[in-house]
Image: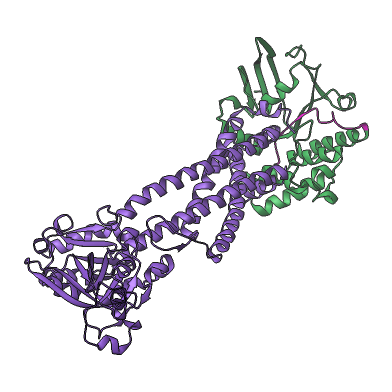
Amino acid sequence: MNHAWQLALKNLRRNRRRNVATAVSIALGFGGLVLIGGYAVRVERFLRTNTVYLQQTGHLSIYKEGGLERGTAQPATYALSAEEQQVIATVLSARPEVEFFGRHLVGMGLAGNGCTTLPFAALGVEPGVQARALTHPEVLLASPELSRPVKGELIARYPAVEGAVALSAGLAELLGKTRVHDEVPAAAAQAEVVLPDCTTKEGRGALAHDANVQLAGLTWSGSMSAVDTEVVNVFHTPLAETDDGTVVASLQTLQSLYDTDAISYLSVYLRDARDTSRMRGIIEDAIRAAGVPVRAYTFDDERVGPYYAGTMPFLSSLVGFIGLLVAAVVVLSIVNAMTLSILERTRELGMLRALGFNRRQVLGLCLREAALLTALAVGVGLLIALCVAAMVNNGNVRFSPPGVPGTIQFMLTPTPALCAALAAFIVPLSVAAAWLAVRRTTRAGIVSLLSSHSS
Amino acid sequence: MSQQPFLRLDDVHKRYRLGETVVHALRGVSFDLQQGAFTALVGPSGSGKSTLLNLVGCLDEPDSGRVLLQGNDVSRLSDNERSRLRNQHIGFIFQSFNLVPVLDVYENVELPLLINPKVSAGERAERVLQAIRDVELEPQLRHLPDKLSGGQRQRVAIARALVTHPLLVVADEPTANLDSGTTHRLIDLLLELNDKRKVTFLFSTHDEKLMARVAHVLHLKDGALPS
C-alpha cells in the first residue's frame, strides 16, 4: 500500500531533531557493523587464502584413507600410487566445480651447504599448479605480500634448472644462501663446486657465492638419498614458525629424493569456496566409487588448516559480541524514538481508528515509519562505512599479525553480500523493536486513545 | 407494520471504572432515529453525551443493551468489521478537529478513502475535491493544518467526515472551539449537507445557537433520557 508508505514518510517529518538523532545513532551503529564485518571478512579471506593457496591444501585435500594421520610415519603405506593418482585425476577433471588440482609430496630431511646441515620439511609441488595457485586472483586480492617470493621467481619459471627449489627465508639465512639463482653470475654457477673452508669467516662467506643446496633424506625403502638443488627463490611461509625450516621443490625433485612415484595428497581448488562442504562428500564418494579408498578434508578442518580453524571461532565470537552490542544500541534508539513518537500521537492514532483504520493498519503505519527511518539511516551508515573503508585501504596501513612473517596491509573489505546481510539484519530488528514499542498502544481501545492528552 | 428506524438504541448501559469508583455513564438509554434526522444531544457535563456518541459511532461497546444500525446489532461485529463499518458508513467530527498535522487539506480529507478498496483512485480524487468544494476550501487545498484558522480546520474535518458518503455523521461538540461567526457559518453548512445529502447527523452540543436551529433534541441527564 503506497499511501501507507507515503504517510509514514511524512510522519518522519515530525520532530525532526529526534528523528535525525535516532537516524544518526543507527547510521553510526550500522556503519560500525559494516566496518567490523569488513575487517572480519578481510581476516577470513587472508586466513583462507593462506591455507588454501599458499600452504596449498586446496579447498579440499584428498589423502588415502588414514594418510593424514599416519602418512608421515608410514609414507609408503599411505601414499597414493601413480595408478591411483590417475583415477583421482579422471574423477576431478569431470567435475565442473573443480577449477584445478595439484599433486603433492611431503617429506623431511636435512639441507646442507657444505658447512652446516639443518632439518627441513619439504613440500613437493607441480610447478605449474603452484604458479597457478600463487597467482590466483583471490591470492592477489587477499594476500599479495606472501604470494610473492622475497627473492627470485617461482619454480615454474626455471624449467631448465635441474633441481630448482625454494627455501623459506629463515632457512636460507641459516644456510647462508643469500643469493638465488638469478643473482649468481653464470660463471660461478657453472664452476666446479669447491667445498668451502668452514673454519674461516671468508670460507663461510663464500657460501653465498652460489645458490647450491644439498638435500638429504631417507627413501621410503629406508636408504640414504641426496639431491643437488639450486635455490631459485626465497619466500616467507604463511606461518612464522615454519619460516626457518621449509623447502618447496618440484614434485619430480622430491620424488627423486625419496625414490618414489607416489604422492602424499592432492589439493583440489574449487571455483567457489562456498561449495567446499558440499563438494567434500561428493568428490570423496566419487573417488571411492572409482575404487580408491580416500578421505577428503576441507581447508577449515583443524587437521588440515589448524590456524584457520583455530582463529575463525575466536574472530566470529568477537565480531558477534560487538555486533550484539551495536544491535542493542539500535534497538534502544528505535524503542526510544517510537515510544516518544507514539506517546505524542496517541490521540491521532485514535482518530485513525475512528476513521476506520483497523489495529493492523495502524500498527503497519508505525512499523513503516521505523522501517523507513532505519532504511534511511542504513543508507547513510553504509555510505560512511564505505568512505572510511576506502580511506583506510588507500592509506596502506601495515601491521604484523601474530604468527605471520612480515607485514600485511590493514584492510577493510565490506563486501556487497556482507552489507546486504547486515541491512537484512538491522531493518527487521528495528521493525521488531518498533513493534515492541507501539503494540500496546495500538491494542488500546479507541475511546481511550481519543481521550489521551497528546496532540 | 412500522418502518424500521435507521438507528435504534435499546436499553443501553455503560459503566466505567475510575479507580475504586464505578461510574454509570449510561443507564438504560433507548431511542430511535430516522434516516436524515438532524439531532442534537444536549445535557450537562458528565451526563453521558460523549459515551453515547462513542457507542453510536461504534467506537465503543455497551455493557448491556443493543445498538442497531439499520437493524444490525453493531456490538456483535468483530473489531475489523466495526472498523469497516466506521470507514464506509460513519463519519466523525471531533471537537478538537484531529487533523494529521503533516498532511495538507487534500490529504487529510483523502485519508479515510485510502483504506476503502471499493473506491478507485479516480473516484477518490473526484470525491475529495467535491468534499473540499462543499466546505469551500479549494483555495487552501495544499495548506497544512497549522496554516488554517479554527473554522477552516473544522471544515476540513467535516469534509473528511463526508467524503466517504456516510449514512451517519457523529459529532462531539463540533462548534466548541469556534467563534460565533464561524459557528453560524458551520451550522449553515451542516444543515445544508443534511438537507442535500440526507445524511443523519447526531451531535452533542452546549451551544444555544446550534440548539435553536435543530428540530430534534435529545436531553440526556445522569446517563438517561428522561421521558
Depth check, front residue: A19 or A294: A294
Q: Quadrant of the C terminus of chain A?
A: top right
A93 left or right, relative to A30: left
Q: Determine the residue located farthest toward the bottom in the rendered image.
A: A187
Q: In the image, is A52 to the left or to the right of B221?
A: left
Task: Magenta stretch: give its range.
Answer: B165-180
Position above or below: A82 against B74? below
What residue is at 64 percent from the left and 48 percent from the top? A24
Q: Is residue A322 magenta?
A: no
Seen as rendered, the residue at the extreme right is: B181
Q: Quadrant of residue A82?
A: bottom left
Which image quadrant for residue B44? top right
Magenta stretch contains residue B178: yes
Q: Which chain is purple?
A: A
Q: Give the drawing colour for chain B.
A: green
Measured as percent of width and height from the top left, residue B81 is found at 57, 34
